[in-house]
Image (spheres, helix red, strand yellow):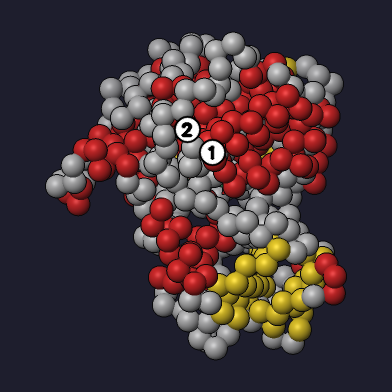
Amino acid sequence: MTASSSTKRIAIIGGGFSGVMTAVNVARMSKHPRHIILINAKRPLGRGVAYGTRRPEHLLNVAARNMSAFPDLPDHFVQWLRTRSEFDTVPDLELRERFMPRMVFGDYLKSMMHHHLQGMGDEVTVTAEFVEGVAVDVEVNGSSGVVLLEDGTRIDADRVVLASGNEPPAALPGAELLQDHGGWAGNPWLPWHENLPGDDGTIVILGTGLTTVDSIISLRAMGWLGRIHAVSRHGWLPEAHFRGIDYHDFPSPDVDLTTLGLEKLRALMEEHCGKLRELGANPAIVVDKMRPFTQQVWKNFSVEERLAFAKKDAARWNIMRHRIAPEIHAQVTSSQLTGQLQVHSAYIERVEADGEKVKVCLEGGESLTGDLVINATGPQTRFSSSKSLLLSKLMEKGLISPDDMDMGIRITDDHTAVTKDGTESEVLLALGPLLRGTLWETIAVPELRGQASQVAATLVGGSAAPAEDLSALVEFII
Ligand SMILES: Cc1cc2nc3c(=O)[nH]c(=O)nc-3n(C[C@H](O)[C@H](O)[C@H](O)COP(=O)(O)OP(=O)(O)OC[C@H]3O[C@@H](n4cnc5c(N)ncnc54)[C@H](O)[C@@H]3O)c2cc1C
């Protein structure tokens, strides 16, 4: 079916989970003709940064049962896994709890795309085209827009969705002089594996989060036997998922967590973490039980409370919240036990060339030198310093504005972008990691699938798929 001139045109910038699932949901919901133009660059379309990995040792950090791409079909991913012969003999209970390779989840997204956007489904009103290219600007003319690509292509659209995902890591002092240095990997999501030193070499990884874990796991899978140093301010590695206990004391039905305020919430959480420790259970259960309320709590915090949380609590929160598959955790622990991996707690001051090596200068005069140094310090979060040409251009023109925290785009509840002068954009919408300052929890699939459904509903003028009952879900978190 080809798009007629009366067909509404929707351009989506970004072909990772957020962009693809927005398009798929538009196809599922729309009752009227629409034409979707999915614009994507650099990463494999439909897979994005996380699921574009070709390395089978990179596992999801969420169990299969909670990775459905649809908020209204909670078992969808597990059912899709059943279409693959390698899981034929795996019992349902076991399959649901497995941490699948991320590339398998990428296959799942690709198959959603194929089914709903490439004419294989029942959707007869929606057509789609896929454009490989970097969007660098959007011109807004009243209630429609034009997306400009780097190569000069112009794409007309009635609505434009910004789904550009995570920013690359923030540059570290001194890194600007290392751009062409063979020992420097400034973006951990670009291939650095070709520059591996020999087994007598040293790799320094900056950061101790999920991307660092990815790197350690890959080095092990490649059989690399050299020394690994990982360094971050606190030196905390992610914890493993665990089997929880029934703990019904938190949250109490008498307490409205969403209006408590930071100080009282902190005290309450500390109290329950203490109780869980006394019971011999993992205090992270409290963080899991907060999950259905987190976005509302964050929205109700004052800007001062959000800033205080980001400064004082975020590192600990993230460690408890973003856990990894037990088998991945076991491998990292094994690297530590064998002495291959050493973790340091120190503030990174700057990086500099040291001949063919790279030196990492730490606070207090200490330093680490690596044949290869990988910057895995996490995505840059100061939105006004975005490295994206597109986002900085839109900000400069006032078509979008940073949220109060300067962590992402300011939006309304239906994901419409808010302009610099505070009006709702007639053209632009946003979802995904770009909403960190507004929602805090906006990175993982369990949040993003609801957003993709909401954005699609805004685009087609319908209502989003009913949100699943997360309070029921957390009871089963392992
Ligand atoms: C290494 C890693 C592992 C993760 N593992 C999990 C997990 O196991 N479970 C989970 O729930 N979540 C996981 N996440 C969280 C993950 O961020 C989300 O699940 C999700 O993949 C984010 O999708 P996205 O579409 O918003 O962004 P992305 O995946 O970053 O996709 C954005 C896409 O937009 C493109 N793009 C950006 N700007 C432009 C432009 N100007 N023009 C054209 N194209 C553009 C990018 O190149 C990219 O292809 C992981 C994240 C990372 C980084």
Q: Nearer the viewer, mark 1 or mark 2?
A: 1
Q: Is residue 119 visible?
A: no
Instruction: Give coordinates of residue 367: x percent, y percent.
Output: 77, 76
Whether the residues at callouts 1 and 2 have beta carbons within 8 Å, the answer is no
Q: Residues within 10 Å of mark 2 (few under 14, many from 20)?
A: many
Mark with earlier residue (1, 2): 1
Q: Residue at x 58, y 57 (%)?
A: 237
Label 1 sits on a secondary structure element that is: helix
**Mark carried by residue 391:** none
Instruction: Give coordinates of residue 231: x percent, y percent.
Output: 67, 65
Q: Which residue is label 2 attached to?
A: 446
Instruction: Give coordinates of residue 377: x percent, y percent.
Output: 67, 57
Q: Which residue is label 1 attached to?
A: 278
Viewport quadrant of the C terminus: top left
Q: Gap between marks 1 and 2, in whole Å?
A: 30 Å
* Vertical side of 66 occupied by 460: above or below: above
* Vertical side of 32 occupied by 341: above or below: below
Q: Amino acid at mark 1?
A: Glu
Question: Would you say 182 lies left or right of 365 here?
Answer: left
Which quadrant does ligand 1 occupy? top right
Q: Is mark 2 within 8 Å of ligand 1?
A: yes
